[in-house]
Amino acid sequence: MENETPASAPVPKMVPIWLIIGITILVYGVAIAVTGIVRWNHPAPGVAMTRLHADFWWGLFMTALGLFYVIRFWPKPGR
């Protein structure tokens, strides 16, 4: 009898792990892309293929992937 919950008690909702992963990828992607923008005109000396700006492009890719996961796994109202 002690384990019973009243009918008016709200049911806790779980947050999908993929939402948390998406937010993490999104934050890292934005940070890497901003670093790439800052280093666009001032590349580090001695880095091979620095003209490709891999940090900027990789940051954009991670940002897009993170946004996809956040939008896809954002909790819907009523579920």
Image: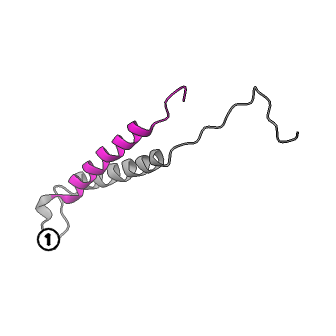
Picture coordinates of residue 35 (x, y %)? 28, 55
User: Which element carries disc 1, helix, strand or loop?
Assistant: loop
- Return the residue nearer the eye: 43 or 79: 79
Q: Residue at x 41, y 40 (%)?
A: 70
Furthest-bottom residue in this view? 46
- Is the residue 44 above or below the residue 8 in the image? below
Furthest-front residue in this view? 1
Horizontal side, residue 45 vs residue 11: left or right:
left
Picture coordinates of residue 79 (x, y %)? 54, 30
Which quadrant does the N terminus fall into? top right
Q: Which residues are magenta?
A: 53-79
Magenta span dominant secondary structure: helix
Picture coordinates of residue 27 (x, y %)? 39, 49
- Is the residue 74 above or below the residue 34 in the image? above
- Return the residue nearer the eye: 67 or 73: 73
Label 1 neighbour load within 10 Å: few <14, some 14-19, many 20+: few
Quadrant in the rendering for residue 7: top right
Quadrant in the rendering for residue 46: bottom left
Picture coordinates of residue 19 (x, y %)? 46, 44
Horizontal side, residue 66 vs residue 8: left or right:
left
- Is the residue 67 above or below the residue 78 in the image? below
Q: Which residue is mark 1?
A: 48
Q: Is residue 63 magenta?
A: yes
- Amino acid marked by disc 1: Ala
Horizontal side, residue 71 vs residue 54: left or right:
right
Q: Residue at x 20, y 67 (%)?
A: 44
Quadrant in the rendering for residue 42: bottom left
Horizontal side, residue 62 vs residue 7: left or right:
left
- Is the residue 28 above or below the residue 50 in the image? above
Q: Residue at x 82, y 37 (%)?
A: 4
Its colouring scheme is one colour
Q: Residue at x 12, y 66 (%)?
A: 49
